[in-house]
Image: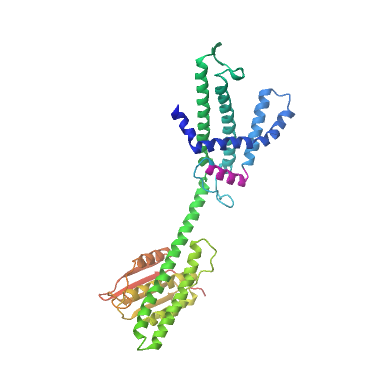
Amino acid sequence: MIRGIRPLLRGSTYSGVLFAYCGALASLPLLPLALLPALSWRSAPESVQVVLVLLVWAVLVGAVGLARPVRRALVVSARRLLRVPLPNPVAGRRPSGSLGLDRWRTPIWLVLHVAVGWTGALASGVLFIMGLSLPGHWLGGEARASLFGTSVRVTGGWSWVVAAVCVLLAVTVCVLVAKALRWSAPRLLGPSAAERLALAAERELLLAERNRIAHELHDSIGHTLTAATVQAAVAGELLSADPAAARAALRSIEESARAALEDLDYVLGVLREERSGTAPTRTLTDLPELLDRLRHAGAVVEPALSGELAQVQGTLSRAAYRILQEGLTNALRHGTGGPIEVRVVAAPDGLDLTVVNRTGARTGPGAFPTSGRGLPGLDERVRLLHGEFQAGPDGTQHWRLAVRLPVRVSA
């Protein structure tokens, strides 16, 4: 008996029974409307009238479940009272291509909720009253068992046994009511197959956006910190010998940091799901400014630009800028001070990007460890654009980064 009563002692069972009984009581205002057809058809047999009332009542209850605010309220209440992990309903219109039965899941749940609530309330109420009245013959109660026309009256100590059985059955009914609702809630109130697909699509878009933001943050902030570290080292060395050059390096640090702060402000706004400003736009037309910042850092840059770079599409132009930025950052980090060759060719059928620099361990001012995420990030970015990516040694003393992107040049 203790094992049978133990589930009732759980908070979820108490709240589940309360949830079921509240659903049953909430359907009472619809009962007068359900009685109208039976009252207008008085000549029908009593059994037919009862069935008709129940059917109309069920239809009215189900109609209430068609309203979307009702489903949201049911999901919230079931999550709190039944302790089932239900996600919030998908906002907006129903997903296209959803099954016709999906819209009826909430009405079916509401009818089931009311039916289980009334069944549990009536059954447990009758059993509990029997368990209280039989032992002392309160309210003139007695136990009588009938089988095939034979009636046996239960008196004496057996009345206490029957009373205990009635109480135990009342407890069992309460537990079954809570379990029935907890079992059916995820299946009828949870997201449908179409809604799960919509949620998965939204999640995929969110992950893609965050992955893109991670690339942007790595390229922008990584380049700025690399250039600022080298420029600060150069400014420190030239502060006494060439103050003008040192001031130019400090101005370049300021400009790089200002651009990086714009990128960082936008990224933080997106990650916090706030309405951030317009995303900073860096395209191939900003490449000369990028090269100037590298020169202020003491790098020797040898650019070779051909084609109408301003005519390249915005998306590919922004991606090309970030690819070159990462390639130049790696050259600044790992190069040994030799010239950095930058080649950009915009042709009608493709965009070719090449960065070549001397390789070797950087020592002295500006030396720092790296994360190793640059090249894998570049490879992923290029693959998403259906391009070709190559990076590796070019001879014994050079490193070569080569990227080809499919491109359309507008007239």
The correct choice, above or below, for 263 with respect to 114 in the image is below
159 displayed left or right of 393 = right
Q: Is residue 360 left or right of residue 311?
A: left
- Side of 98 relative to 58 (left or right): left
In this picture, which residue range is highlighted in magenta? 66-80
Query: In front: 392, or 146?
Result: 146
Q: Is residue 81 visible?
A: yes
124 is within the stretch colored magenta: no
Image coordinates for residue 287, horizontal then vertical, percent? 44, 77
Q: Residue 17 or 265: which is nearer the viewer?
A: 17
Asked if the stretch drawn in magenta spans residue 77, the answer is yes
Image quadrant containing the N terminus: top left
Res. 74 image quadrant: top right
- The residue lying at 51 percent from left, 19 percent from top is 160
**Rendering coords of residue 311 (x, y %):** 49, 75
Residue at (40, 76) in percent of width and height: 344
Q: Main secondary structure of the magenta part?
A: helix
